[in-house]
Amino acid sequence: MNLPILTIVTFLPLAGAIWLLFINGEKQEKIKRIALVIAIGNFILALPLFFKFKLNTSEFQFVENVPWIKEFGISYHVGIDGISLFLFLLTSFLTLISILASWNIKDRIKEYMIAMLILETGMLGVFISLDLFLFYVFWELMLIPMYLIIGVWGGPRRIYATIKFFIYTMAGSVLMLVAILVIYFMNQRVTGEYTFDLLKIYNLDIPMGAQFWLFLAFFFAFAIKVPMFPFHTWLPDAHVEAPTAGSVILAGVLLKMGTYGFVRFSLPLFPYASHQFVPLIAWLAIAGIIYGALVAMAQENLKKLVAYSSVSHLGFVMLGIFVFNIQGMEGSILQMINHGLSTGALFLMVGMLYERRHTMLIADFGGLTKKMPIFAIFFLIITLSSIGLPGLNGFVGEFLILVGVFKSNVIYAVLATTGVILSACYMLWMFQRVMFNKLTNSANKKLKDINIREWAILLPITILVFWIGIYPKPLISRMDVSVNHLLTQVDEKYKITLNKLENENEENVYALKEDESAEHTIEVD
Amino acid sequence: MEIIIPPFDLKSIAPILIITISAMLILLADVFYRKTFRDSLGYISFLVVALAAMAAFTQMDKTVYSFSDMFVVDNFSVFFNLIFLVSTGIVILLSVTYIKQEGINYGEYYTLILFATMGMMLMAGGSDLLTIFLGLEIMSISLYVLAGFKRDCVRSNEASLKYFLLGAFATCFLLYGIAMLYGATGTTNIKEIASFLANNPSLSNPMIVTGTSLLIIGFGFKVACVPFHKWTPDVYEGAPTAITAFMSVGPKAAAFAAFARVFLVALPDVAQKWSIILWVLAVLTMTVGNLVAIAQTNIKRMLAYSSIAHAGYALVAIIAGGDFGASSLLFYMLAYTFMNLGAFAVVIVLGRKGEENTNIEDYSGLGFKHPLLAVIMCIFMFSLAGIPPLVGFVGKFYIFSAAIKNGFVVLAIIGMINCVIAVFYYLRVTVVMYMRKPVREFAPLSLSPFMILALILTVWGTIHLGIFPAKIIALAQKSTLLY
């Protein structure tokens, strides 16, 4: 049976959002339940993808390809491979968790849930699009609900933060649109076919000079989203002001769109430019790793600390992508998932503290272990996972990335490793200040431990943290073929370009020689 | 002496005839049977427009030159006629209750709108510079009157006078340009000018160059491109809101229709001269329009500057030229009609007599007081900002792909950067609606069935054409056969 499963999963939340439109906004409980049911249904429908996923092929799976705007060669072409599969599942999972985490929002819950569900459709769409136009539509579409979530349900400086978020992302992506169009017409000139189909455009051999500019255009779009140092300034603002669920989605999924974009578009489309840009990107990534960690250490606000730790972690992911070997790439993809889980969980727990105490300042806490022992256990596990303790998920990803980086450049690897140490410093120090020490603040004496709903939020994440940490094989085995395929694809195209370059050089040298000999003859004459 | 009456084909101007005759009848009805007809003039006019649209639709896929090659019916003009009729129809829907509420319910209101529409159709179908000029004048004079239709309101009077004086001045430039071209080529017929220029390389002919520049000034004024835009904000702010809505779409589209026909059909051989000028104008128009719009606090002025910026995007389409550029212009004008009229419709709904609630701040808290209306406004704002999957995005995408296809990559990049600047002020409307506390009570909404129909039409156009634009794109693509 050929059910369009990706389409169903992707658009189910949108259908849910439309359903919610017709429900009276007063019935808060009903609205929350419907949204939750939709999110659970979405996750349950998405789960079979993991099991039915074929391990031995690099082809895209669950593909659907329907013409959409024939006049421009735009089609609704979707599918997943071992790279997007996990991001797709992660999105579905984290949205479910976020909706659970938003249970205490009283204000305009209907609009909130609608925005959340539309956001989910947009995010899922980004990860399955195999058509450049479709990708761009989803990429921009998901800005609107995120903008509203931060702007309407956010903290005191929400308007500033949300406009900054919107304009930054938009500014990055419009240049990408120009680049997409340039590729489109380039492809048309070579093949005579107007198409935005990514798989067809993969075969296009883009001239070196053009690759440079096109790569740069895509780079801005993705680097702002990741965010790479120095394009990260929107991130702390957005995170601090966003409601808990907004932060979770932002850190868990939105940032991954940037790194995913590099893997899916930049590398295979512009292999030569990608190789040329390695030093720049590597140094920016390392700067991000160290800078993010140092700034995180200095934060007094829990959310800001986690936000800056994201900058640091995403630096690792970027580094892993741009070493062009299988360990680095797989580590990066794994680390995207890990970061989504652990940072998502950290934001959730900061949110739980905030709901109880209405503050996110580290100084306001201290000694919480006495009042919230179970919370403390979860918090410790997640903190350690974020640091990368062996046996937990963060370790596997970081280790693979560092192995990959060592193989390609020792200096990068040494510098990046300092990030691991620094992350232990700021995370453990933060943990100490919040959870240990003496319980001095009287407001903290009335704190209650987590309730059932919060159990339901944290437990699944913790299980995944252990699972990936101890037995990551099911994930890695699903990535292997796709990552290998991607790397060979990049490598082959890169070599072709290099060969061309050499031939041209030889010709030039040859031509020079001819010139010289010609001059020589004249002299002889 | 024998007088030869050139053959003329009334069928070719059927939509124009329908509009003209009905406009006259409406005027007469208002004079003689005021009591019976006054309240139903709006519906009648709407029906007339619908009828004319049907007549225009039947002209699809035929190319007919008539009136000694002065007038042409081709897909290009038919497409534009449909744009005009859609915008006129929606504006009439907007006006029915609006003019009653404002106390300006005079019969000549609809007559003038219909005459303006007739002028626009003449412009789109003019295959002779003089026909275009004639259409332009009919349209403009009707608009001068309409802009000052709130007779007791000083700002409205000011708008009318300003528009008239500057408009008349700009028309002189246009006429002078036509005269120059006539002097250089010996004809005012667009096709003949084209063939003359093709056969006589005349890039250095000062008459041609001056004539072309003067035409650019004349048309530039009508489409409100920088630096000929100074009239726009004042006129848009002072005129009755329904008329502002009308001016921002219909006449602008008409001016672009004539602009495109003259420059892409008559003057493609001197393109390398005018495309540089237009390049600069487009960049100026987009940038100035968007930057100044950021500073506006009045929604009508903001939309005025935004319409200047949009004229800049449309200029990009003309610069890109070719079939791709022309079809992107067609699509964009239709897209712009829906989204901009929609935005003005919301402004009218929220307005009240006298002070029209036109400060952006007045919309504070609208999102939760009137959720549906706010969502609708959001849709129009996001569409104007060019966010997918709305029609404004497809339009911009189309125009910039045309620009890139024909090698104007830098222009496309500048345009795209402008889209980001524009996002800022469109977003501000949504910010105010959703993220601020109300500053004052909202008056009860003035929603009539007509207004609701207008809103449904514009929302439908904005969303549906954004997600399924294929049919209209196909139609636009076959409507570019300008020759």
Image (cartoon, rainbow, N blue to C red):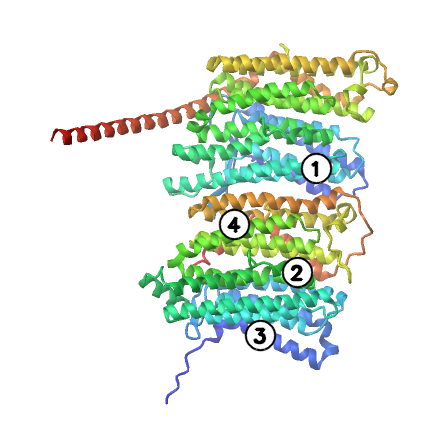
Q: Nearer the viewer, mark 2 or mark 3?
A: 2
Q: Residue at x 51, y 34 (%)?
A: A218
Question: Which of the 4 image quarters holds residue A148?
Answer: top right
Residue placed under numbered mark 3 in the picture: B20
Residue type marked 4: Val
Residue placed under numbered mark 4 in the picture: B283
Left or right: residue A421 compared with residue A32: left
Q: Nearer the viewer, mark 3 or mark 4?
A: 4
Q: In the image, are marks 3 and 4 on the same chain?
A: yes
User: How many dots with numbers?
Assistant: 4
Q: Secondary structure at mark 4?
A: helix
Q: Secondary structure at mark 3?
A: helix
Residue B382 image point, x, y percent:
63, 46
Q: Is residue A500 above or below residue B35?
A: above
Can residue A108 be seen by looking at this rendering? Answer: yes
Residue placed under numbered mark 2 in the picture: B234
Residue placed under numbered mark 1 in the picture: A160
Mark 2 is surrounded, within 10 Å at the Cα level, by few (under 14), some (14 to 19) or many (20 or more) other residues, namely some
Q: Are marks 3 and 1 in contact (CB under 8 Å)?
A: no
Q: Are marks 3 and 4 in contact (CB under 8 Å)?
A: no
Q: CA distance from mark 2 to mark 4?
A: 22 Å
